[in-house]
Image (cartoon, rainbow, N blue to C red):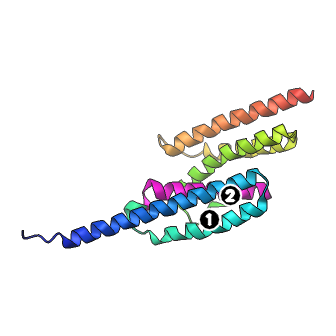
């Protein structure tokens, strides 16, 4: 044969090794993101900060993946989105705000997708607050999610994953509205 497949095979194997490493790294990032979020839900801020420190170290490992196919892969994107969700949830609970886009060094699409996922965690937080009778906290969360939704509906997401996730925020907001209404009626 006149064509040498050795270089092609080497490049293929190198890509596959990188892909497998990305998948492992992504799994670790997702696990640590969930651990951070669950620690915040349990009000164990010491554990949340510890998990977040590990998470930030792991997220730094994504920088070594330069191959466009890897950066565009689901593993890479989901890892970033979970990280953004965890980081912003912790920031909201600590300071009542989210980490600004320009401070994270991530692309706008993954940031927005992570913020969309954040609202689900905020609904869970509101449910816990409601169970504990913390009506003002439920209202604050409802108002915060409403602000996020008000901002996101100004974008033209077309028919994409972002459009579907923004639509899901509307349902999260409806749940929060119903909680606030029920608590208001119960108060009267």
Cβ–Cβ under 8 Å for marks 1 and 2:
yes
Query: In this image, 71 relative to 153: left or right?
Result: left
Q: Main secondary structure of the magenta part?
A: helix
Residue at 55 percent across and 63 percent down: it is: 106
| Residue 157 visible somewhere in the drawing | no
Q: Magenta stretch? A: 71-96
Mark 1 closeness class: few <14, some 14–19, many ≥20 residues within 10 Å: many
Mark 2 closeness class: few <14, some 14–19, many ≥20 residues within 10 Å: many
In front of the other: 4 or 140: 4
In front of the other: 15 or 95: 15
Q: Position of residue 20 (x, y in %)?
A: 41, 62
| Residue 80 is covered by the magenta coloring | yes
In front of the other: 178 or 37: 37
Label 1 SS: helix
Q: Which mark is residue 36?
A: 2
Q: Quadrant of the N terminus?
A: bottom left
Q: Is residue 185 above or below residue 141?
A: above
Q: Quadrant of the C terminus?
A: top right
Residue at 77 percent across and 51 percent down: it is: 42
Q: Position of residue 79 (x, y in %)?
A: 53, 57
Q: Which residue position is annotated with label 1? A: 55
In front of the other: 149 or 172: 172
Residue at 61 percent across and 46 percent down: it is: 152
Quarter holding residue 174: top right
Q: CA distance from mark 1 to mark 2?
A: 8 Å
Q: Is residue 49 above or below residue 115?
A: below
| Residue 43 is covered by the magenta coloring | no
Quarter holding residue 47: bottom right
């Amino acid at each position: 044969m006149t064509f040498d497949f050795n270089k092609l095979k080497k490049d293929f194997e190198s890509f596959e090794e990188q892909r497998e490493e990305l998948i492992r790294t992504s799994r670790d990032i997702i696990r640590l993101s969930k651990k951070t979020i669950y620690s915040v839900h349990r009000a164990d801020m010491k554990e949340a900060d510890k998990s977040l420190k590990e998470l930030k170290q792991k997220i730094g490992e994504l920088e070594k993946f330069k191959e466009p196919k890897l950066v565009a892969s689901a593993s890479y994107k989901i890892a970033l989105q979970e990280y953004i969700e965890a980081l912003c949830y912790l920031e909201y609970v600590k300071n009542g705000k989210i980490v600004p886009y320009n401070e994270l060094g991530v692309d706008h699409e993954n940031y927005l997708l992570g913020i969309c996922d954040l609202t689900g965690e905020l609904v869970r937080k509101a449910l816990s607050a409601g169970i504990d009778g913390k009506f003002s906290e439920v209202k604050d969360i409802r108002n915060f999610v409403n602000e996020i939704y008000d901002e996101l509906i100004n974008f033209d997401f077309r028919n994409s994953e972002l459009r579907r996730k923004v639509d899901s925020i509307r349902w999260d907001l409806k749940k929060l509205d119903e909680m606030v209404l029920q608590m208001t009626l119960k108060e009267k």
